[in-house]
Amino acid sequence: MNLENLGELFLTFLNAHRDIAFFLVLGIGYILGNIRIGSFSLGSVAGVLFAGLIFGYYGFRINSAAQMVGFALFIFSVGYQAGPGFVTVLKQDGLKYFTLAVVVGFTGFGIAALWANMLSLPPGMSAGLLAGGLTSSPTLAAAQEAVHAGSVKFPDGWSEDQIVDNIAMGYAVTYIFGLVGLISMIKFLPKLLKIDLEKEAENFETSKQESTTLPENVVLRTYRITDPEIKDLSLEVLREQYWDKRSVVKVKRNEMFFPIDEKGLETGDIIEVLGPRKYFTEKISKIAEEISPEWKGEDVQDTAQVVISNSDVIGHTLEEVAIHRRFGLMLMEIRRNGKHVEDDENTRVEQNDVLTVIGTPHQIEAMGEYMGQVERAGVETDMITLSFGIVMGLLIGSLSVQVAGVSVGLGAAGGLLASGLFIGYRRSVKPTFAQLPEATRWFLMEFGLLVFMAGVGMRAGSGIIETLQHNGLALVAAGMCVTIIPILVGYAVGHKILKISPALIFGAITGAMTSGAALSVVIKEAKSPVPALGYTGTYAFANILLVIAGSLIMIF
């Protein structure tokens, strides 16, 4: 049996088992995406797109309903993840980042529309050009969804399927060059401009460094009191000289445990101390010697968050609540409305404050029962909120207005993004709401996007050769313009006019183009996560703006 016959048998088998073909696209796409040439790799999205093109060339397609499910999971998860950062950015430098996102998006939109008219591109290909040049999957999704929803009037002689195919082919041709161009520009532009990203990131971290009361290296140790003069010290003196106002100290005397502020200390007392290493060296070591503890199963320490809801606690100070004495827990941090709160004994507890504590599980449960609700880093997903959040997003996306004969609205992509932003932000304020663990969120985003991209590749594969023959070089040139010019304009405006720090500007530009791959390059060059702050600033704005642009570009 020759290779040609073997290939035909393989294709016949896959046509009879389309589910196997679909997962082959994902698996092969990942393999292609992980291949490295020097420091460059395509990444999973481009790899799956390539694999989809190959399978699409041989006539394989993905079910449109499955592609829509992937699209919905991806867009909603993007919004959920960006929600907390989006609100923070709005309160701080929101106007700057919004302006930069508008500049980058509008520049790319204008160039794509100009090239579409100059090249007389087939209907819909302008949307693929914009999405591919800016490497923006949400733009692609919004454009295709606008066609499926009937928001766009089709030119005579063109069907819905043909226009969707044009969008996919325009995207497939320009995306790869857009990705390579974007990464290359982000990598080499700072060098051309003589900007030391590593130094700029260090300077930014130093200037923005905030004080924090979070202790580090918290451990549980056991000591025996050796200072013979300790029994003569009052509770007030013990508290002032030998307590850091945070660590938990339990005294064992005559086989009984009790808080230190009940009976004081005596020579020979055994004390169990939960606190940071610094406390042991600066305080406890002066009056006691460390001994080997008698560990029990219930002594295993756990970390959890307690959300305050009990009206008997709200409004009281930490000194009055006495978490360390009442529950034997060490308070690590207080967060209020998603922000860290500097705390001391006079800090008052408010509704929905999130207190991070360390102690044994049964002590944490006792505190949760009394003060509110325990919220651990869970593994379960709130499927009710996830499901109805997507429903809410789709309903929002169905609202539209007529502009120049085109039905303009957020569309399904924008609606899902808005719903995700709201729910993600609410989750940051009230952790008991809408749990979506990080691992689950990553899976939904990655799998949802790749299902969608596999469908795009398969759809474009059938006509990709013909597209390259008729518009190939011109379309590639147009895509490179859509990629490069917005970067240069965005840098000029962001740095010269908006005065965004050099440590943030390149991260902000990648966020304005919704490119996580390019962000990873910036972070690597800066040897710091600081550029991610700029990325977060523009990312949520850009998703909304580019989703709307995906519908509007269909006019051209």
Image: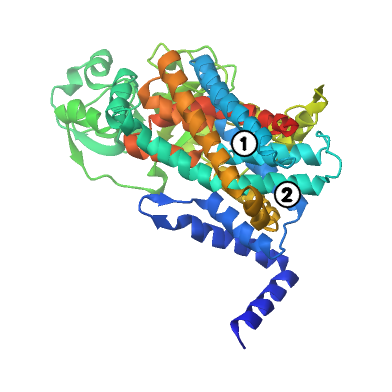
Residue lying at 72% horizontally and 63% vertically, measured from the top left: 59
Coloring applied to the structure: rainbow
With respect to residue 468, does 27 lie above or below?
A: below
User: Would you say 479 lies left or right of 71 here?
Assistant: left
Quadrant of residue 158 within the rendered picture: top right
Q: Which residue reaches farthest bottom?
A: 1
User: Measured from the top left, where is residue 333 in percent x and y?
Assistant: 42, 25
Q: Label 1 sits on what residue type?
A: Leu
Q: Residues within 10 Å of mark 1 (few under 14, many from 20)?
A: many
User: Measured from the top left, where is residue 21 in percent x and y?
Assistant: 66, 65
Q: Which residue reaches farthest right?
A: 156
Residue lying at 73% horizontally and 34% vertically, measured from the top left: 554
Q: Label 2 sits on what residue type?
A: Asp
Q: Which residue is mark 2?
A: 165
User: Measured from the top left, where is residue 358 in percent x and y?
Assistant: 41, 34
Badge 2 element: helix
Tell me which numbered mark, 1 or 2, is placed earlier along the sequence: 1
Q: Nearer the viewer, residue 133 or 359?
A: 133
Q: Nearer the viewer, residue 125 or 26?
A: 125
Q: Which residue is mark 1?
A: 130
Q: Which image quarter holds the N terminus?
A: bottom right
Q: Nearer the viewer, residue 326 or 98?
A: 98
User: Would you say 394 lies left or right of 547 here?
Assistant: right
